[in-house]
Amino acid sequence: MERKQENRTTLVRKEDVQRKWYILDASGKTLGHFCAEVAKILRGKHKVAFTPHIDTGDGVIVVNADKIQVTGAKEAQKIYRYYTGYIGGMREIPFKIMRGKNSPYIIWNGVKGMMPKSRLGKQQLRKLRIFKNEEHPFVAQNPVKVEI
């Protein structure tokens, strides 16, 4: 009695990965939902042949980062913290000030928190480019504009 061969899961090799670049417009989008979609594209989970231990993700260009929205009272209550390394060096920057000062950091920080905490996650995060307004220098990559 012969056994029928079932379909097997295909594991992609890093040499076989076809990379594309996508442009995502952040204007009017909610911060958390938008960052989750960006992280999904960076990891490659939007592809049929997603392989967890191989970088199958694509590059993402985010434009209009200063027009990102948050819900509820986060506009007044959300705080970004970092430590300088010195005694008493804890710094806190409210969301409103961070939006005016360094709006790409808001999206970068959100996406970074949703990526794997490993060497592969850091490698995938390097394919993220964020810009405050509509202009970007990545015309040569032939990016595809995607609506989320």
Image (tube, rainbow, N blue to C red):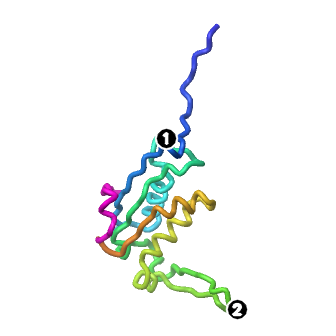
Q: As displayed, is residue 57 above or below residue 69? A: above
Q: Which residue is mark 2?
A: 87
Horizontal side of residue 132 vs 119, given as left or right: left
Q: Please state the horizontal and vertical placement of residue 61, each as a whole percent of the image.
A: 38, 63
In the drawing, what numbered circle is on residue 144? none
Principal secondary structure, stretch drawn in magenta: loop
Cα–Cα span, label 1 and label 2: 48 Å
Horizontal side of residue 134 vs 55, given as left or right: left
- Residue 63 or 124: which is nearer the viewer? 124
Q: Please state the horizontal and vertical placement of residue 7, each as a whole percent of the image.
A: 54, 26
Circle 1 residues within 10 Å: few <14, some 14–19, many ≥20: some
Split into 4 quadrants, where in the image is the N terminus?
top right
- Residue 32 or 21: which is nearer the viewer? 21
Q: Please state the horizontal and vertical placement of residue 84, each as a whole percent of the image.
A: 63, 86
Q: Earlier in the sequence, mark 1 or mark 2?
A: 1
Horizontal side of residue 52 vs 40, given as left or right: right
Q: Residue at x 50, y 68 (%)?
A: 110
Split into 4 quadrants, where in the image is the C terminus?
bottom left
Magenta region includes residue 39 = no
Give, as a single range, the part of the protein colored magenta: 135-148
The amino acid on which the numbered mark 1 sits, given as a three-letter code, is Ala
In the drawing, what numbered circle is on residue 49? 1
The amino acid on which the numbered mark 2 sits, given as a three-letter code, is Ile
Magenta region includes residue 143 = yes
Q: Residue furthest bottom?
A: 88
